[in-house]
Image (cartoon, rainbow, N blue to C red):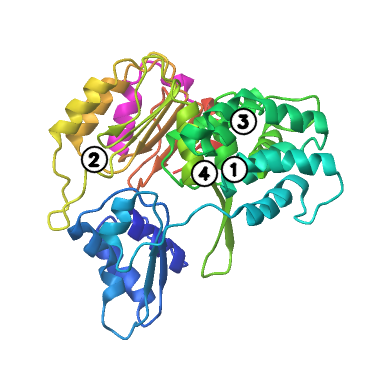
Amino acid sequence: MRLTREMLDCVSQETYDGLCSFTKLQEVLKGHIKSKRVLLILDDVWEVMDDCRWNKLLALFKCDDGANGNMIILTTRKPSVAKKRGTIEPINLDGFTSDHFWLLFKSCAFGDENYEEQASLSELGQKIAQKLKGNPLAAQTVGALLRDHLTVDHWSNILKTEDWKSLQQTGGIMSALELSYDELPYHLQQCFSYCSIFPYNYQFLAEELVSLWISQGFVKHDYSSKSLEEIGQQYLSGLVNLGMFEQVEIIRLSGRPLTFYAMCGLMHDFARLVSRTECATLDGFQCTEVFPAIHHLSIVTNSVYRMDDQTGNIPRNEKFEFFLQNIVTSVRKLRTLVLIGEYDSFFFKAFQDVFGKAHNLRQLHMSATSAHFNSFLCSLVNPTRLRYLKLHDVHTLEWPIPSLVSPTHLRKPCLTF
């Protein structure tokens, strides 16, 4: 349902937040793409979706109603996904050749692929480039790190760093990313690693992302007269320049562009790696280890709860309720809680029992009905600590929010429905 809704958002000027039926969403989408040729790109697919779900998702693009020539491009890092879903032989992308990679590296490090000025820097640059194994993302991140200081001393120190020792095990990329990450000031490390709790390619508006960072105390006043929001925007620009976030522009049919920010797949993997002691994600039964001192936790239920199109009900999943109650053993230090996806009332009861004791919760993101939302807030031990509140897919929410959570406690731009 999520993918179908995202497709619809790309082709329609209207919003269809009130539609909660997969069948109805497909009917509306069909009306928009009828008699048109469509190119659909499914990027960085990880799940080997079963044939039934796959065929339902793509049924519209196979209709014989004159819409000939539809094409689907799927990218993945898992050979099993490519073999299962490909209708042609998968195309494997290798790293750049050394000559092409050197041109890219010079463009990233010097801002010009034809740079020939400082022979000593070029010589050091070639040695560093050889360690990156032809990976363009590594060229972007390490190149941005080098570009800040075009000096022989700085480049020599980068070349001598101990982080290169693990290159043979990682193929170069994780060491390259770690090198760039270690050079970041601590506040940017916090901002980057925190975002690992959101799903792959989760799209943030700049204002939303900055507000999240501010509510966690990651954004600090400097000696200028700039507001926290302006300083947070500078943080975001710095992470974009380093390639740690991508800027994604979506043009609506109305012609109005929307700019989002997202982590690409490898960068998201790296963020999870460096944040594993403070951040965790439960994506169905797949999860990173949940340490007792965890600060930020997300729960994604899309793979374990699905609405029955015929009845409109969501079947119970007792196995997942048990899983949740047993894997989350402590919420004492929890500051962020994100719940994405559909669920039933039995799951919500388990969710409430586990997280109602979160004393220090500062951020709450929920897919919820008004009854569930109000019930959960009332069950919190200390709801007045909340500084950021975001509710997804809520259509029946009615004010007032329970009086124990005064909107004055929340940062105003962060209260969204």
Residue marked by disc 1: 138
Task: Say which mark, if any, is on residue 263.
Answer: 4
Q: From this viewpoint, which residue is outermost toward the bottom? A: 66
Residue marked by disc 3: 179
- CA gap, disc 3 and disc 1: 10 Å
Front in this rendered view, residue 318 or 164? 164
Closer mark to the observer between disc 4 and disc 1? 1
Closer mark to the observer between disc 2 and disc 4? 4
Which quadrant of the figure contains the N terminus?
A: bottom left
Residue marked by disc 2: 343
Percent position (x, y) of residue 129? Answer: 65, 43
Quarter of image, res 227: top right
The amino acid beneath tag 1 is: Ala
302 displayed left or right of 359: left
Front in this rendered view, residue 71 or 389? 71
Query: Is 343 above or below relative to 408?
Result: below
